[in-house]
Amino acid sequence: MTGAALEVLDLAKRYAGRAVVDCLSFSVRPGTVFALLGPNGAGKTTTVEICEGFRSADAGEVHVLGLPPRDRSLRSRVGVMPQSGGAYPGLRAREMLRLVASFAAHPLPPDELLDRLGLGEVADTAYRRLSGGQQQRLSLALAVVGRPELVFLDEPTAGLDPQARRATWELVEALRSDGVTVVLTTHLLDEAERLADDVVILDAGRVVAAGTVAELTASGAAGQLRFLAPAGLDLGALLADLPAGCSATESPAGHYLVEGAVDPRLLATVATWCADRGVLARDLRVQTRTLEDVFLELTGPEPRA
Ligand SMILES: Nc1ncnc2c1ncn2[C@@H]1O[C@H](COP(=O)(O)OP(=O)(O)OP(=O)(O)O)[C@@H](O)[C@H]1O
Ligand SMILES: [Mg+2]
């Protein structure tokens, strides 16, 4: 065993002869947040539901906390927030959360969790009368109330308003601080960028990129560095100090742009060059690739079926 919280090896799943997950391998380090990213239909939910034991694989291996996904002992150790549903429509929010908490040895306090997710005021409302975003947050609460070691969150913030989204992010960060492993799916790139230690980008059931967010956004980094300074600086002289492959332009007057592989040394070189001339570079800004740039490069601009 590798000690991974989740290990997926050469996973494959076909529907009607079509591979929706193909040769998929990744592993999730304990106590980290792992994001499975990909456009609609990429195979994220299929993969996660195989790991949760809700669907069977056609080929490959999955180890959840070192065990097969359907091992009964995992029920108390793994929390699941499905992409939709998963609750009893007639039960009130607080009732349902208390019920699920009662199955756990050391649950989180249900009322505190409701407050934290902004559900205090609807605690006595039946699930079916909650708004979509409230149902979603309750579903998250249900997944974590039992203090699982590993939680699967399938698009935890889809359809949430900004406040609820932030509360969800804070909860995920708190889980990680408590040593919980979180596996989430999303196509919100800022969400993955903010939360995830490791990311796998899936397209059509296959891995198209994997690594930390920093690794993915740095690879082949075409970056930009902008600053404001008095007009008419000698950019030829600046270029002479920069590594090959960089460009430097001024447009409009006093607005400078340096393009190239932006790294700490490049930033220092530009700042020193300005300092040597007694020039104060104002609004110095570095823009590197975002995960969104990487995602679109790898998965293409067209919407999926
Ligand atoms: N039970 C099923 N029967 C047939 N095809 C299915 C089934 N479940 C999923 N699929 C197909 O498998 C592909 C992957 O679906 P999946 O739900 O895993 O995608 P996803 O990445 O979660 O997408 P989304 O971002 O829209 O949630 C889709 O093309 C879908 O139509
Ligand atoms: Mg899905």
Image (tube, grey):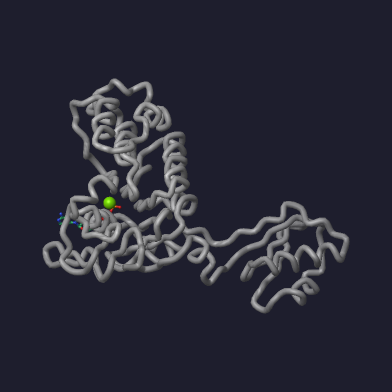
Relative to 149, 295 lies left or right = right
Residue ID at (81%, 59%): 231
Residue at 34% of width from left, 58% of height from top? Answer: 5
On the question of residue 239 being in view, the answer is: yes
Q: Where residue 190 appears, x then y in whole percent?
A: 47, 50
Q: Quadrant of ligand 1?
A: bottom left
Residue 128 spot, x, y in % from top left = 22, 28
Q: Is residue 100 above or below residue 57?
A: above
Q: Is residue 114 above or below residue 273?
A: above
Give how far across and how far down residue 218 sits, in percent: 54, 66
Residue 40, image x and y in percent?
A: 30, 55
Locate the N terminus and report the quarter of the image it occupies.
bottom left
- One can see residue 129 in this view: no
**Rendered view: 36 above or below 258:** above
In the displayed structure, 121 sits above or below 304; it is above
Q: Residue furthest bottom?
A: 244
Q: Residue furthest right?
A: 278
User: Which quarter of the rendering shows the C terminus?
Assistant: bottom left
Horizontal arrangement in the rendering, residue 198 relative to residue 140 (left or right)? right
Q: Residue at x 25, y 58 (%)?
A: 47
Q: Residue furthest front?
A: 105
Q: State how many labels appear.
A: 0
